[in-house]
Image: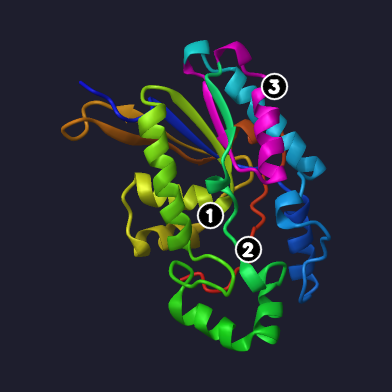
């Protein structure tokens, strides 16, 4: 049988970032603006984020040699690139077929709402705040930014790349919360209501793993089957705190 899919895909959200910490502080203080100077693309891991990445790297290193990732694709954002580099430190680099920073895996773009808290959006852009609630995050596109649908469109081309260049390979993707959720929408063939229900159920933890393995018995030509969803046991096993800090404003959950 001609297999188009990778043998396994791991989706990993980056470790806790300095931006996650700053957002939590701003929300707790009922502030309007997240106090961080860097561009979103330049925000690094926090000290805890490094520890989370190291804990997860040990888990990947403990997999059988023929079961470890041999292709690594990651967002070019610093926090994701740092996470990917830490994960790769424990892998057999001689076995890696490809390592690429792919701009299609970047964080969802927030446009003029960037760095604003929920309260900040409501006070500075009340009409957008209302529209965001009315339309919902799946279709709402802030000026200069993206909707989830926009993110899904670019991820469709990532899947095309994987089926063209990495069939039967073992692909690790390190990116962001929205990227993980939008990949789930595509791979698991969800609709808007289903993925938003998953999103409401809880945020994607930092350095959690969602994975799929190719199952030749599914369908006519085989499909990817879910193996893990938001898996954080590698962190828990090492006593590393699990964090679920948000990357974006929390309003308009539905």
Mark 2 = which residue? 248
Residue drawn at point x = 82 percent, y = 61 percent: 36
Given residues 51 and 141, the one toward you in this image is 141
What is the quadrant of residue 121 in the picture?
bottom right
Find out whether the residues at labels 2 and 1 contact each other: C-beta distance under 8 Å.
Answer: yes
Q: Is residue 55 left or right of residue 72?
A: right
Residue drawn at point x = 64 percent, y = 45 percent: 206
Residue sitting farthest toward the left: 220
What is the quadrant of residue 29 in the picture?
bottom right
Mark 3 = which residue? 89
Q: Is residue 197 magenta?
A: no
Mark 1 = which residue? 178
Secondary structure beneath dot 3 equals: loop
Q: Position of residue 94 (x, y in %)?
A: 60, 11
Q: Is residue 180 visible?
A: yes
* Magenta span of residues: 67-95
Find out whether the residues at labels 3 and 1 contact each other: C-beta distance under 8 Å.
Answer: no
Q: Position of residue 102 (x, y in %)?
A: 56, 41
Secondary structure beneath dot 1 equals: helix
Residue drawn at point x = 33 percent, y = 35 percent: 225
Location of residue 241 with respect to 87 vertically, above or below = below
Q: Is residue 15 visible?
A: no
Q: Is residue 90 magenta?
A: yes
Residue drawn at point x = 79 percent, y = 75 percent: 31
Mark 2 / mark 1, whichever is N-terminal: 1
Given residues 172 and 233, the one toward you in this image is 172
Q: CA distance from mark 2 to mark 1?
A: 9 Å
Q: Is residue 54 left or right of residue 220?
A: right
Q: Is residue 213 left or right of residue 205?
A: left
- Numbered badge on residue 147: none
């Amino acid at each position: 049988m001609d297999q188009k899919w990778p043998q396994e895909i791991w989706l990993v959200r980056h470790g806790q970032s300095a931006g996650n910490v700053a957002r939590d502080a701003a929300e707790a203080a009922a502030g309007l603006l997240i106090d961080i100077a860097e561009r979103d693309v330049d925000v690094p891991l926090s000290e805890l984020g490094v520890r989370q990445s190291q804990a997860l790297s040990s888990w990947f290193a403990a997999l059988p040699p023929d079961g470890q990732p041999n292709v690594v694709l990651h967002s070019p954002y610093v926090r994701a690139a740092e996470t990917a580099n830490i994960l790769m430190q424990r892998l057999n680099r001689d076995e890696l077929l490809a390592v690429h920073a792919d701009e299609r895996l970047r964080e969802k773009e927030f446009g003029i709402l960037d760095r604003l808290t929920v309260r900040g959006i409501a006070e500075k852009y009340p009409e957008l705040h209302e529209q965001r609630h009315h339309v919902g995050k799946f279709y709402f596109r802030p000026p200069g930014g993206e909707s989830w649908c926009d993110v899904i469109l670019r991820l469709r081309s990532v899947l095309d790349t994987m089926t063209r260049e990495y069939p039967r390979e073992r692909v690790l993707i390190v990116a962001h919360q929205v990227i993980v959720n939008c990949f789930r929408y595509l791979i698991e063939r969800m609709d808007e209501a289903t993925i938003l229900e998953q999103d409401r159920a809880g945020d994607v933890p930092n350095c959690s793993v969602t994975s799929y393995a190719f199952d030749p018995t599914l369908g006519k030509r085989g499909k990817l089957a879910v193996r893990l969803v938001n898996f954080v046991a590698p962190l828990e096993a090492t006593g590393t705190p699990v964090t679920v800090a948000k990357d974006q404003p929390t309003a308009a959950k539905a």
